[in-house]
């Protein structure tokens, strides 16, 4: 049986074809996997054509650049929002849901790079916002950053199920967010609202202790409810919301465990809604090279989740299995 | 109710859909572009040489509807051009809406601008076809008529790149091989030089861009033959053509133009500057493929192994027709193989023996002959058409070629198959 094709988030972008094409490892194109004939998972462009026309060369990798830290807005002792000046072009590239970048202190080596979601990108001023929760070595190094910060990007695979966001119009959407995961939800909320959807957002502030999305969304168009949902009672409310048959799209921002619980609940209710989740893989290069994000899906198939829009169910189940 | 799903709405797919519908099936056609007929939107030559015999056979067999349309849409009848006699040239700008209307009237469900991307199997059977928009179409039996053209990567690797042909992959996405998705390997046609695939053999010029004299001659007679300046004659180009029936030296030394609504130019491609050196062609521009000055589409890279009843080997409920089913060239060839596939899809569902056309009919003979030849390395370099080259020679040798309608009717009567494709089986 021929293998199922994977969907690469970068296919057709200005970073495609990427280095993987040069070594016959393209995620999309059979010709660039070393096969003799076309059998691709078409994403709207012929990657092989782009590659051959560029003289059998891939496009340049994303380069690092320096952003100016304009402001740090503390959320708690261990979390803050960074307001960073970049070029307008860079900001524009980071407007789509799922956008993220790698950040690191100027004085630290490459392996301090840490993936961070874009909360908000202002292309007119050339400003991006990220919310950072300080956890361990790499994020502590971010906390110590002074005026300048090293950025590498844009990357886009921060959410799984992105196409469902693009195709949902005039519908009811439910978003369930916990803690720092409020950050990547903002681009999603704004996108869904711009597509005339009715968006309800349930936030459990978790360790962050507060809701920090208000300044970045249109409060009149979005219903935001605070609800601790780790308690039994709280979860009951979530499951009532999930039983709403009119939902077209459910978004889960939080841990894989949270994703799985929501998916299970939706299945119990025979929900027809599409599920979109934050991509919680560990990432280091974002280019499908280093292997930090490798996830085994079928017995012999390993997928680099930094680039592949993995099936949501597969991603969650496999990661929970792998990590116990 | 037997649910028949046809993937690919070219001539073969339309013929399969009609035959399956007439035999009693509920038929859905999935077509990736915004038009039915596929390459039929840029061809037009019917009834030349042995295609005449084959078309009449098909009419007596009960598959006359589509020939009726191409006859009605004819701009010229009984046209002769080098190596070819009594051709009918249909108007490519008229024929697609006529076929679409017929299929609709028959109650055939058309899924236009829907591209099949995968299959779901249950054991050795196809359960459903998955479309690019993630929806699925389920059926009892499936007929693959996706042709063999492109997609872009193949046209680049084995040709001169995407030249924007009528299938318009950049817009509608690539052809896929359904049979390959079920796990059955494709068979690949070869070129004389041993490379894979072949260039399509003709292109079309915009008639309004041609000189008055040429247009007048085309409108009046259907044909216009213009000598190529000696320094531009390229005989090696004949080797790379799909259409070996046109690989004659007359076609290298002359530009042969035929009036099919546009001016059909019987050569795979011709650099525009050179073309414009020829008197009367100073303003010429291409109508199909849009970059006909650079190249043409690459074909024959995806044939399914099949038996002579058009069933794909290795999958229980998959049939095939047209270019998907062998190294066939032509609308007539696509309609005949497609009709048989459509008819047999119903027989298969009812568990009754599949129909094979006898070899004393040209249609039965070509289906069998092409299937034998495809198993040999030389056979893979040849194309099979009633209209010329190797197979027309064979037709003549076996006395299969005739333009006598009574004789053709008698042949079909003798094998007891009059109107077989009009029989309702359910
Ligand atoms: C696409 C994406 C977007 C993210 N967006 C945000 C965000 O907006 N705000 C935020 O605070 N955090 C975000 N994270 C998580 C953040 O990257 C990790 O918290 C950070 O890498 C932890 O590194 P550490 O060295 O400080 O902690 P460690 O002590 O090394 O690890 C703490 C936790 O973070 C996880 N982690 C460690 N290294 C990585 C890594 N390279 N990639 C991903 N997870 C890792 C570990 O599995 C562990 O659960 C995002 C992660 C990804 C993949
Ligand atoms: C330029 C040119 C001129 C020609 N001139 C003549 C002529 O004058 N006379 C003649 O007899 N023959 C001519 N031919 C040859 C003839 O057109 C073909 O052999 C015949 O029409 C093939 O029919 P088909 O149905 O097998 O394939 P196609 O016409 O290729 O049809 C296949 C169809 O399947 C669709 N499809 C493919 N993949 C998918 C998918 N994944 N999902 C949904 N749909 C899909 C395609 O869009 C297409 O509509 C010409 C060919 C060309 C290219
Ligand atoms: S993060 Fe390096 S391969 Fe995915």
Image (cartoon, rainbow, N blue to C red):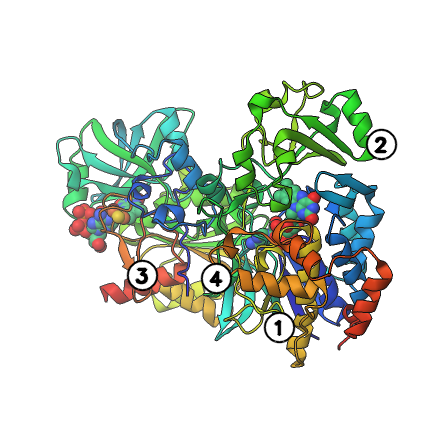
Kindly report the distance in space between the C-alpha atoms of the residues bearing marks 4 and 3.
18 Å
Where residue A39 appears, as percent x and y from the top left, is 45, 52
- Please rate how many residues cluster around mark 4, counting C-alpha atoms within 10 Å: few if below 14, some from 14 to 19, many from 20: some
Report which residue position mark 2 lands on: B220
> Does the closest atom of ligand 3 sit within 8 Å of the Cβ of label 3?
no
Mark 2 lies on a secondary structure that is helix
Q: Residue furthest bottom?
A: B351
Residue lying at the far right in this picture: please name it: B406
Q: Nearer the viewer, mark 3 or mark 2?
A: 2
Determine whether, in the image, residue A30 is placed left or right of residue B76.
Answer: left
Question: Label 3's element?
Answer: loop
**Quadrant in the picture for residue A2:** bottom left
Q: Rounded to the nearest whole Å, what is the CA distance between mark 4 and mark 1?
A: 17 Å
Q: Are marks 2 and 1 in contact (CB under 8 Å)?
A: no
In the picture of the structure, the residue carrying the numbered disc 3 is A301
Q: Position of residue B37 (x, y in %)?
A: 69, 49
- Is residue B38 visible to the viewer in this orientation of the structure? no
Residue located beneath label 4 in the image = B181
């Amino acid at each position: 049986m021929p293998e199922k094709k994977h969907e690469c988030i970068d296919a057709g972008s200005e970073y495609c074809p990427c280095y993987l094409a040069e070594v016959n490892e393209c995620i999309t194109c059979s010709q660039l996997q070393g096969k003799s004939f076309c059998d691709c998972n078409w994403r709207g462009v012929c990657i092989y054509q782009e590659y051959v026309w560029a003289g059998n060369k891939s496009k340049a990798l994303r380069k690092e650049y320096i952003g100016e830290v304009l402001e740090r807005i503390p959320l708690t002792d261990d979390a803050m929002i960074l307001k960073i000046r970049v070029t307008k072009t860079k900001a524009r590239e980071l407007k789509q849901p799922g956008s993220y970048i790698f950040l690191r202190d100027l004085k630290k080596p490459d392996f301090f790079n840490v993936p961070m979601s874009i909360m908000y990108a202002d292309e007119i001023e050339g400003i991006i916002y990220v919310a950072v929760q300080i956890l361990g070595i790499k994020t502590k190094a971010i906390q110590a950053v002074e005026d300048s910060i090293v950025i590498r990007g844009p990357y886009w695979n921060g959410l799984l199920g992105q196409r469902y966001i693009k195709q949902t119009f005039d519908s009811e959407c439910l978003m369930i967010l916990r803690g720092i995961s409020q950050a990547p939800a903002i681009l999603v909320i704004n996108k869904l609202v711009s597509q005339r959807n009715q968006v309800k957002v349930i936030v459990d502030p978790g360790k962050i202790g507060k809701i920090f999305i208000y300044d970045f969304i249109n409060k009149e168009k979005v219903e935001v409810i605070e609800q601790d949902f780790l308690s039994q009672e709280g979860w009951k409310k979530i499951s009532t919301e999930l039983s709403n048959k009119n939902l077209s799209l459910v978004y889960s921002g939080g841990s894989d465990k949270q994703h799985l619980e929501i998916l299970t609940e939706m299945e119990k209710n025979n929900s027809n809604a599409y599920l979109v989740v934050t991509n919680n893989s560990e990432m280091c290069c974002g280019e499908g090279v280093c292997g930090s994000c490798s996830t085994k899906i079928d017995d012999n198939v390993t997928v680099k989740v930094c680039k592949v829009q993995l099936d949501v169910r597969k991603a969650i189940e496999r990661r929970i299995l792998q990590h116990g | 109710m037997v649910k028949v799903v046809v993937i690919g709405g070219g001539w073969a797919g339309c013929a399969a859909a009609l035959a399956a519908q007439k035999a009693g099936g509920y038929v859905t056609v999935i077509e990736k572009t915004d038009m039915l007929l596929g390459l039929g939107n840029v061809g037009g030559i019917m009834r030349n040489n042995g295609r005449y015999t084959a078309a009449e056979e098909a009419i007596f067999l009960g598959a006359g509807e589509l020939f009726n349309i191409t006859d009605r849409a004819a701009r010229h009848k009984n046209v002769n051009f080098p190596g070819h006699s009594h051709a009918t040239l249909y108007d490519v700008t008229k024929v697609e809406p006529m076929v679409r209307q017929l299929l609709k009237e028959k109650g055939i469900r058309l899924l236009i601008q829907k591209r099949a991307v995968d299959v779901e199997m249950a054991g050795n059977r196809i359960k459903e076809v998955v479309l690019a928009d993630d929806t699925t179409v389920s059926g009892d039996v499936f007929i693959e008529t996706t042709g063999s053209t492109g997609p872009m990567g193949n046209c680049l690797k084995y040709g001169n790149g995407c030249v924007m042909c009528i299938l318009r992959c950049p817009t509608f996405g690539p052809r896929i091989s359904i049979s390959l998705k079920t796990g059955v390997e494709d068979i690949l046609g070869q070129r004389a030089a041993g490379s894979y695939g072949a260039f399509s053999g003709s292109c079309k010029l915009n008639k309004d861009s041609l000189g008055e004299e040429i247009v007048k001659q085309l409108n009046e007679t259907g044909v216009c033959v213009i000598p190529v300046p000696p320094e531009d004659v390229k005989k090696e180009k004949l080797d790379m053509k799909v259409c070996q029936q046109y690989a004659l030296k007359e076609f290298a030394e002359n530009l042969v133009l035929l009036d099919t609504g546009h001016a059909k130019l019987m050569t795979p491609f011709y650099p525009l500057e050179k073309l414009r050196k020829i008197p009367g062609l100073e303003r010429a521009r291409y109508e199909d493929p849009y970059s006909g000055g650079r190249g043409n589409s690459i074909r024959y890279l995806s044939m399914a192994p099949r038996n002579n009843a058009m069933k794909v080997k290795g999958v229980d409920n998959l049939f095939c027709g047209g270019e998907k089913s062998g190294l066939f060239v032509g609308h007539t060839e696509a309609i005949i193989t497609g009709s048989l596939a459509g008819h047999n899809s119903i027989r298969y569902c009812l568990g009754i023996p599949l129909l094979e056309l006898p070899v004393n009919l040209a249609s039965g003979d070509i289906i069998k002959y092409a299937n034998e030849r495809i198993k040999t390395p030389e056979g893979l370099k040849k194309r099979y058409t009633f209209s010329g080259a190797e197979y027309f020679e064979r037709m003549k040798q076996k006395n299969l070629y005739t333009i006598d309608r009574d004789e053709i009717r008698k042949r079909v009567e003798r094998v007891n198959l009059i109107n077989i494709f009009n029989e309702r089986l359910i």
